[in-house]
Amino acid sequence: MNLNVLFFGAAADSANRRNAELKLEPGASAEMAFSKIVEAFPRLRDHKLLFAVNQEYTGGDTILKDGDEFAVFTAVSGG
Amino acid sequence: MTTDHVEITSAPISVESVARKVVPRECGATVTLDGYVRKFTKGRETLYLVYEAYEPMAISEMKKLCGKARGRFDIANIGMVHRVGRLEIGETSVVISVAAPHRRAAFEACEWLIRELKRTVPIWKKEIYADGEMWVEGEPAL
């Protein structure tokens, strides 16, 4: 299955892109996807990161589906 | 019947228009926060800021905060607008207006909403200095 990965803010600078496609085995969890993404873009390790699935904060044990939107970003700093 | 107004915009924000959008007849006070770009942060001079949002999620998180605030405080409508893109010193980055029958609940809810916005709504700020730039990273509280 494929995930549509999005990066924002400092995470986009570290990954040097704003989006990517990630291939995963069916049944993969959010935590597995997150590890693969950090492995693919090691400069992300410079940050404390959060992730969201389909525009919702979610736990690492969430099971992903084909076509899910998986966003990776640093702790937020709006206001 | 409540009508919140939640928006992400790249255009300048009119503070008054956000406040006036949320005033129902049964209310007696609106508290409005006007958050704007500060020139000096910890002694370092900022030239300007760039804000970026994960827009659909930011809107959805802002709407969730409105619902939660109404559960915690005796308030009516909420206006919440955040700007994105390049902002000059002194320009408004965020406006939160809370209308309530009585002022105390409006003050408390407004403070709670900005605190939660800064903690959970996916928006990021980059500070641009004369000699460099830096994304501000918040406290990961989730």
Image: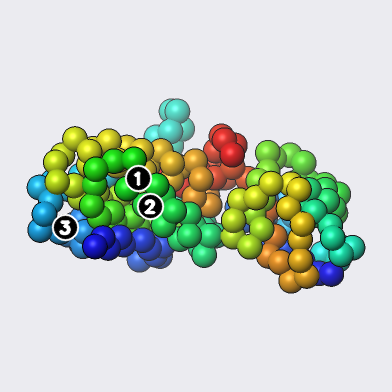
Query: On the image, numbered disc 3 is attached to which residue?
Result: B23
**Is B19 in front, or is B48?**
B19
Circle 3 — which element? loop
Q: Amino acid at mark 2?
A: Gly
Circle 2 — which element? helix
Quadrant in which the N terminus of chain B is drawn: bottom left
- The residue drawn where x is 27% and y is 63% is B3
Circle 1 — which element? helix
Quadrant in which the C terminus of chain B is drawn: top right
Q: Amino acid at mark 1?
A: Gly
Q: Chain of mark 1?
A: B
- Label 3 Cα neighbours within 10 Å, binned few <14 / some 14-19 / many ≥20: many
How far is mark 2 from mark 3, CA to CA?
A: 17 Å
How far is mark 1 from mark 2, CA to CA?
A: 7 Å
Question: Are the residues flagged by discs 1 and 2 in contact, CB closer than 8 Å?
Answer: yes
| Total numbered labels placed on residues in the image | 3
Foreground disc of the pair 3, 1: 1
